[in-house]
Image (spheres, rainbow, N blue to C red):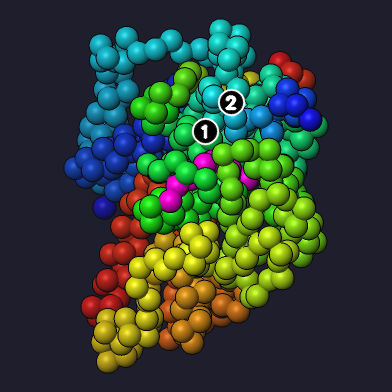
Amino acid sequence: MTEQDRPQYQQLLARKVEVVNVGLEGFVKDLRDCDIGVVHVDWKPSAGGDPQMAALLAKLGV
Amino acid sequence: MNVVVLNEVRKGFYLDSVALMRLSREVAGSPGVIEAALMMGTPSNAAIMRNAGLLEEGTAVKGNDLVIAVKAESEAAAREALDSAIKSLDKPKTQGEAQAAWRPHSIAAAVKAKPEINLALISVPGEFAAAEARKALNRGLHVLMFSDNVSLEDELSLKQQARAAGLLMMGPDCGTAVIGGAPLAFANKLTRGRIGIIGASGTGTQEVSCLISEAGAGISHAIGVGGRDLKKDIGGITTLMAIDAFDADPETDHVVLISKPPHPDVAKSVLERIGRSRKSYTVCFIGASEVEVPPNARFSPTLKGAAELALGHKQIGADFDANAVASRLLRNGRGGIEGLFAGGTLCAEAQVILAAAGRKVASNAAIPGALKLGVEPSGGRDRLIDLGDDEYTRGRPHPMIDPSVRDDALRAALRTAISR
C-alpha cells in the first residue's frame, strides 16, 4: 500500500499538523511556540445557547 | 447577617473557562463577598448556581449568556463587587489583543480560509463539545476533544463517524497528545525519539512521556484516546486505530499503551491486535494483576514500571517505601496517608503502590481491591482522592487548570493532621 492509499488517520503522524483551536485560548500559545500553524476560533455557543438545538444543527450539517 | 445575592446577565457574551475562573477569583476576593461565580448560563451551570443560592429569584439564563453572581454580607458590598466585575468585562482590549491574529467565528470559516488545517482542538463546555466535534469531522478534520462531561452515546457516534471517514477522534476527556512535535492541550516539553504512546489517560501519558524523556530517550508521538475508549460501550475504536497509525509510522520502534484495566472483551481485541503489530509494545493497565500479553509485548501495572520497560529495564529513581514514609509522617502511627491528586491515573497508581506495600486504601476512584469512599466507613485507611473526578469538575475547571480545589482539600487535610 502506498502512502497516498492509506486512510487519513494512518498518514496523520507523517504530516504537519495544522490546528483550529475551539475553546481555551491558552492552548494556542504552546502551538505557536512550537511553530505549529493554529487558528483560534472566536467561539460562542450556537443555537442561542441551547445545547440540544446546537447538537441537532451540527447533525444536520448547519 | 443580611445575605444579599445580586446577578448580572450578559446576553450572548462568551468567555472561556480560564478567563471566567480568573475573574471569579477577583470578584470572590472583594471585601464582604461570601461567594461569587462567573459562568456561562448552560443548564448544568444554572443548576449549580441555583443549588448554591447564587441566582436571584426569577433570573432566567441561556447557554450563551454570561452570568455574574455575587453573594455578599451587604447590598453595598454585593453592588461594589458586581460593578467591579462589569468594569473588568467592559475594559477595552489592549493593543496587543486588538492586533492579534485573525479570528474566524466558526470551524467552517477557519477551514475555508486555511484549507491546510487538518485537526480541531476542542475544549468548549461539554454540552456543546459534541456538536463542534461533528462539525470538524464533517469537514474532514481529525479531532482532539479536551472537553469532558460528554455522553457515552455522543462519544460512540463521533468515533464511529470518524472511523468511517478514516479520521482520528481523540477524546472526549483527552487531556494531552503530541503529534509530530505539536503539543495538543496539556503537553510537556519532551525530547523527540522513537517511543510512541497510546494513552487513555492524560496524566498517565504525561507521566510516562516525561519519565522517558528525562531518562534520555524520546517520544515520537503520543496519541490520546479518551478515558472511556477501552470500555465495552466504545470497544477501543480509537486505540485500535492508533495501533494502525503507529504500525504505519517509520519514526516509531516501540509503543507504550496506557489505560485503566479495560473491559475483558476490549482487552482481548486490543491485545490480539498488538500481537499482529510489527512494533514491540509495553502494555500498562494500571492496577491490573498480571495480564497475559502477546510475545511482542510486556506488561506493567504502574506508569513508572511501564517507562522502565520501554527504556529496556532501566531503573528510574529510588524505590519508594510506603510504610517507612507513613511511620515517619504519622504521629503515633495514627490515621493514614492522605493523597490529593489532580488526575485519576496518578491516584490509581498510588493505590497500586500502597496496596502492594500491604496498606489498606480507600478512594473516590478506587481500583479493584480498594474501598470506594463514601460507601463504607474508611477509618484508619489511606485516603486517596482524585480531585479531577467529575464530581469535582462540574461547572468548574479541572484542578490542573484551577488548583484551588486541591488547595482547599490540602488545608483541610493539614488541619485534621494537626488536630490528631
Residue B306 location in percent, x, y?
53, 63
Q: Dot 2 falls on which chain?
A: A
Examine the rendered structure and indicate whether residue B239 appears above or below residue B311: above
Q: Which residues are magenta?
A: B217-225
Majority secondary structure of magenta residues: strand
Give the residue at the far bottom of this rendering. B332
Please give the label number shown on residue B105. none
Residue A39 visible at all: yes
Examine the rendered structure and indicate whether residue A38 appears above or below residue B352: above
Residue B14 location in percent, x, y?
46, 24
Residue B61 drawn in magenta: no
Relative to B237, B285 lies left or right: left
Relative to B118, B3 lies left or right: left
Q: Dot 1 falls on which chain?
A: B
Give the quarter of the image for residue B245.
Answer: top right
Q: Residue at x 54, y 41 (%)?
A: B221
| Quadrant in which the C terminus of chain B appears | bottom left
| Residue that mark 1 sits on | B180
* Residue nearest the viewer, comparing B293 with B407: B293
| Residue that mark 2 sits on | A15
| Mark 2 secondary-structure assignment | loop
Relative to B86, B159 lies left or right: right
Q: What amino acid does circle 1 point to?
A: Gly
How busy is the neighbourhood of tag 1: few (under 14 within 10 Å), some, or many (20 plus)?
A: some
Labels 1 & 2 near each other (Cβ < 8 A):
yes
Q: What amino acid does circle 2 point to?
A: Arg
Q: Residue at x 58, y 55 (%)?
A: B256
Residue A10 location in percent, x, y?
69, 33
Q: Residue at x 25, y 11 (%)?
A: B95
